[in-house]
Image (cartoon, rainbow, N blue to C red):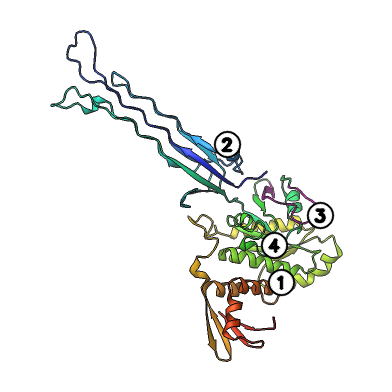
Amino acid sequence: MFYDRAKIYIRSGNGGDGMIGFRREKHVPLGGPDGGDGGSGGDIIFVVNGNHNSLVRFHRGNHFRAGDATHGNTKNRTGANGETLRLEIPPGTIIRNADTGEQLADLTEPGQETTILKGGKGGRGNARFASSVNQAPRIAERGEPGEEMWLELELKLIADVGLVGVPNAGKSTLLSVVSAAKPKIANYPFTTLQPSLGVVTLDEYETMTLADIPGLIEGASDGVGLGHDFLRHVERTKVLIHLIDGAASDPLEDWAMINQELALYDIALEKRPQIVVLNKMDLPDAIAWEPIIEEEIKKAGYPFCAISAATGQGVREMLYQVKQILDETPEPETAFEDAVVIRPEAEDEAFVIEREGFGWRVSGKRIERIAAMTYFEFDATLIRFQKILEGMGITQALTKAGVKPGDMVYIGDEELEWGEE
């Protein structure tokens, strides 16, 4: 099972106590203080291991403690330091304080590490307190206790290319064909319930990593189904392969809906380089759809190709096209941000309704952004927009204000005609 979230308890080691001691050597009647310092407690360090791709180890045990130091000893001997605990995590792990939600680290590169908790300092022995006026101090310090806290770990897969599309579009089949990954494959929606990673080898030196993101559905950006759990894995990718199901009743509508969900979740995803790939060209429906879809996709400004993941038709050519786009694409600006905003702040939900000419003007940061992202030419996205209006209370507010069928409603740059309920 794939684990991309975990909640764990960590505690750093206690520092050792300082020693109160005096020299007791033969022929040294006035031996001075010789109590040593305690050692320092072990730290808690997280380090990125590129061979890990899951947080499964943190589900097998969720309490982690570094070693305590030993106490100081006579003859100015310092206690041994506690053993530092180094916890290995996969690339793309975000570490947060579970109590406050504060982000403590976002580790993305193999070998990166960060100290989350420092071990307690060792107490000073009495030799440290000797002075000209107090040559035999009977004072020392106890070790500093370690720190403790609960953490939330969140993994966002890091891949060059993300495979997105509706359920049953053929993403798992494509991943299994082009890499050594072995995702579960069957002819029904939601076969894939967890992301899968694969490495594609184009030739002896050219490789790229692909992430099969489980099928997205309408409402995923609002958390419907497992929406947020899946969408956050798209954020780390540089290029998207948008796989269209050639056997669907309306592949173009599916394409528009997925693009809308991506943009509603994170506006930057709307601008992520995307190649649109029509799959299942071994079926008559897909062959019939190809010229229509190619014309619309290219008109929208996206590169297009058609393949059959099942037979391998066009797959190799598509991969080289993806690699070319990947090589020309810089790192996405949002890939390694300190904080990722999934939902808008409360004030973003606010809106104002005003009369404008013979119509109505709806103003508000979030609703204007959603309107600008909506494909009104497709019924599915239009219905979704209507649901959003209802969910935000805008429909009810317009009705209360006196809107009537046939009135124009302006939202941002969009002009909409109010229809019958």
Please state, as top left, top right, bottom left or bottom right, where the N terminus lies in the image. top right
Among numbered discs 3 and 1, the one appearing first in the sequence: 3
Mark nearer the viewer, 2 or 3? 2
Q: Quadrant of the C terminus?
A: bottom right
Q: In the image, what residue type sits under mark 4?
A: Ile
Q: Which residues are magenta?
A: 183-203
* Residue corresponding to mark 3: 187
Say whether residue 414 is visible.
no
- Residue at 66% in and 88% down: 406
Give the residue at mark 2: 61
Numbered badge on residue 217? 4
Mark 2 vs mark 3: which is more N-terminal?
2
Magenta stretch secondary structure, dominant: loop
In this orientation, which residue lies closer to the viewer: 169 or 406? Answer: 406
In-image side of 282 versus 60 (left or right): right
Residue 149 lies within the magenta run: no
- Amino acid at pointer 1: Ala
Q: CA distance from mark 3 to mark 4?
A: 17 Å
